Image (tube, grey):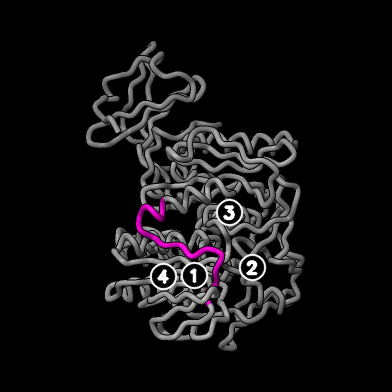
């Protein structure tokens, strides 16, 4: 970023068109000057999620959207209005004299004002699940000035972590342990959130408004959020129950793979899912030889089509990954992995990335409506009064497709948690966010916005071979989703257009 422009010295207003941004500095701080309509704003230059350059993002309806992972910030207050960012950006006072705009001192962050609720606040909120949706909900409850007790019940041994990083930078050795927790330990005390780890909820009594844990203890609640997420699919492979076979879902899982990789030379990854391929890339970055075994003929073909699948396969092959497609693993015996076609591979360890399934057991046991996920309405309410659900375990009515869908995306889970929290406090806000996710393969990042389980046409703008393209997934003439490579701002524009389609109701 070019920060040579001293924004305190003044900038001609005509320099910035509506929606334009100018990177500069105020003292030692990197600052972006933004024009939205006839107003000017000065904000911190980097997203508070992963530090994305906001000057390369998009200005829309009084907010700036990060080009990397689509977080959104209010230009006037700096509030992080949409996940994955949870922390605000800094703002500076702007003064316009004649046709010149000057950036002045920092503005003290003001707590966002809570909405006026039509319903009384619950006496307490219990959240089952320590993942993206659960933590985002707890944060939003406090941000909305909720003063009651908040309890998170998590089966994990670690506090909520940045799960996308577990298969990406952390596994590859490029992220430190201290980067992974979503909140520092002291935040739970500061925000008065009781965090109960290594605990599993057994059942819900919605009439008595209690949750029973597996240890026999009970928690009373005024409102309950189920955010149990999803769990890895365990394959019934002979020999897969040995200490050489790993699954990846938790921080502990990733640490175990890292430890094993330190003393290994070869690994086999079962499954060409996003997780499987990201694990393959991370292990190659660590210098291990990697074989990927998967039943499909093209990686990611079912999700992203043959065109992007071919590109992803090429990228991995350029980095030394060997694919065994159209094959499954028949057995694992020591260091020998036998494939369905009869060939064998040598591996010091195996990582299974064969997809996940929603964690819905507690919902089933408790009489909630379940259909390939926990069924909720547009307000994320289950069929039990006072019980909400959010995240990977949930199937909800999607206004973009007109269908009930379940999506396993980190950002979407966080946004669901935020909406559920507001509705627990009486907002009656419909959940209608456009799904978004990103996937990292060495130095190539894929951004995907929308949701397309089926399509009848794929339109490529640009060149996939040159790794500079936007790919649209179309059904009945309507664009359902867009994937982009090296076109981050275009992906933001696609997100806005999909939101406008929702607003138009077409």
Viewer-side label of 4, 3: 3
The residue that mark 4 highlights is: 251
Q: CA distance from mark 4 to mark 3?
A: 28 Å
**Residue 432 visible at all:** yes
User: Which is more foreground, mark 2 or mark 4?
Assistant: 4
Q: Pick the quarter of the image with the N terminus.
A: top left
Label 2 neighbourhood size at 10 Å, few (<14), some (14-19), many (20+)?
Answer: many
Q: Which of marks 3 and 2 precedes in the sequence?
A: 2
Along the viewing direction, whichever of 387 and 455 lies nearer the viewer: 455
Query: Secondary structure under badge 4?
Result: helix
Q: Which mark is residue 270?
A: 1
User: Which mark identifies residue 224?
Assistant: 2
- Residue farthest toward the bottom in the current orientation of the protein: 216
Tell me how far mark 1 sits from mark 3, CA to CA: 16 Å
| Comes first in the chain, label 4 or label 1 | 4
Report if residue 321 lies within the magenta region: yes
Residue 53, disc:
none
Q: Which residues are magenta?
A: 315-329
Q: Name the residue nearer the viewer: 330 or 187.
A: 330
N-terminal of the pair, mark 2 or mark 4, is 2
**Image height check: is 5 above or below 156?**
above
The Cα–Cα distance between marks 2 and 3, rounded to whole angstroms, is 38 Å
| Percent x, y of residue 271 | 51, 66
Can you tell which of label 1 and label 2 is closer to the viewer?
Answer: 1
The residue carrying pointer 4 sits among few (fewer than 14), some (14 to 19) or many (20 or more) residues within 10 Å by Cα, namely many
């Amino acid at each position: 970023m070019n920060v040579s422009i001293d924004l305190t010295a003044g900038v001609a207003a005509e320099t910035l068109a509506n929606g334009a941004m100018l990177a500069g500095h105020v003292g030692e701080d990197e600052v972006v000057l933004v024009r939205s309509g006839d107003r000017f704003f000065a904000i911190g230059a980097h997203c508070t999620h992963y530090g994305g350059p906001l000057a390369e993002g998009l200005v829309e309806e009084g907010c700036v959207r990060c080009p990397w992972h689509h977080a959104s910030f209010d230009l006037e207050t700096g509030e992080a209005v949409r996940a994955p960012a949870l922390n605000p950006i800094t703002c500076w006072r702007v003064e316009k004299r004649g046709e010149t705009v000057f950036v002045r001192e920092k503005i003290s962050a003001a707590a966002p004002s809570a909405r006026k609720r039509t319903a009384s606040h619950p006496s307490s909120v219990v959240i089952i699940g320590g993942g993206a949706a659960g933590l985002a909900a707890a944060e939003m409850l406090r941000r909305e000035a909720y003063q009651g007790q908040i309890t998170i019940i998590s089966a994990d041994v670690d506090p909520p972590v940045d799960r996308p990083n577990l298969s990406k930078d952390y596994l590859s050795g490029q992220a430190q342990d201290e980067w992974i927790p979503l909140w520092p330990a002291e935040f739970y005390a500061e925000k008065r959130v009781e965090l109960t780890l290594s605990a599993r909820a057994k059942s819900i009594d919605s009439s008595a408004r209690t949750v029973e844990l597996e240890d026999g203890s009970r928690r009373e609640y005024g409102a309950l959020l189920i955010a149990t997420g999803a769990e890895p699919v365990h394959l019934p492979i002979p020999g897969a129950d040995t200490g050489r076979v790993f699954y990846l879902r938790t921080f502990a899982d990733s640490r175990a793979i890292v430890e094993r990789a330190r003393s290994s030379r070869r690994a086999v990854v079962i499954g060409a899912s996003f997780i499987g391929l990201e694990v393959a890339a991370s292990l190659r970055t660590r210098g291990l030889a990697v074989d990927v075994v998967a039943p499909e003929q093209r990686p990611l073909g079912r999700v992203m089509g043959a065109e992007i699948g071919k590109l992803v396969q090429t990228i991995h092959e350029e980095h030394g990954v060997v694919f065994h497609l159209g094959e499954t693993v028949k057995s694992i015996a020591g260091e020998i992995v036998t494939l369905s076609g009869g060939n064998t591979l040598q591996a010091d360890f195996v990582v299974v990335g064969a997809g996940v399934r929603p964690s819905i057991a507690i919902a089933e046991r408790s009489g909630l409506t379940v259909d390939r996920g926990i069924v909720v309405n547009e307000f994320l309410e289950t069929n039990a009064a006072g019980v909400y659900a959010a995240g990977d375990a949930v199937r909800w009515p999607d206004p973009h497709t007109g269908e009930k869908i379940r999506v396993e995306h980190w950002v979407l889970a966080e946004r669901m948690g935020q909406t559920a929290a507001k509705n627990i406090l009486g907002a009656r806000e419909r959940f209608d966010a456009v799904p978004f996710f990103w996937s990292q393969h060495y130095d190539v990042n894929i951004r995907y916005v929308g949701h397309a389980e089926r399509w009848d046409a794929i339109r490529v703008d640009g060149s996939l071979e040159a790794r500079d393209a936007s790919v649209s997934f179309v059904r009945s003439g309507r664009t359902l989703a867009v994937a982009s490579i090296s076109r981050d701002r275009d992906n933001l524009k696609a997100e806005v257009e999909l939101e406008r389609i929702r607003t138009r109701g077409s």
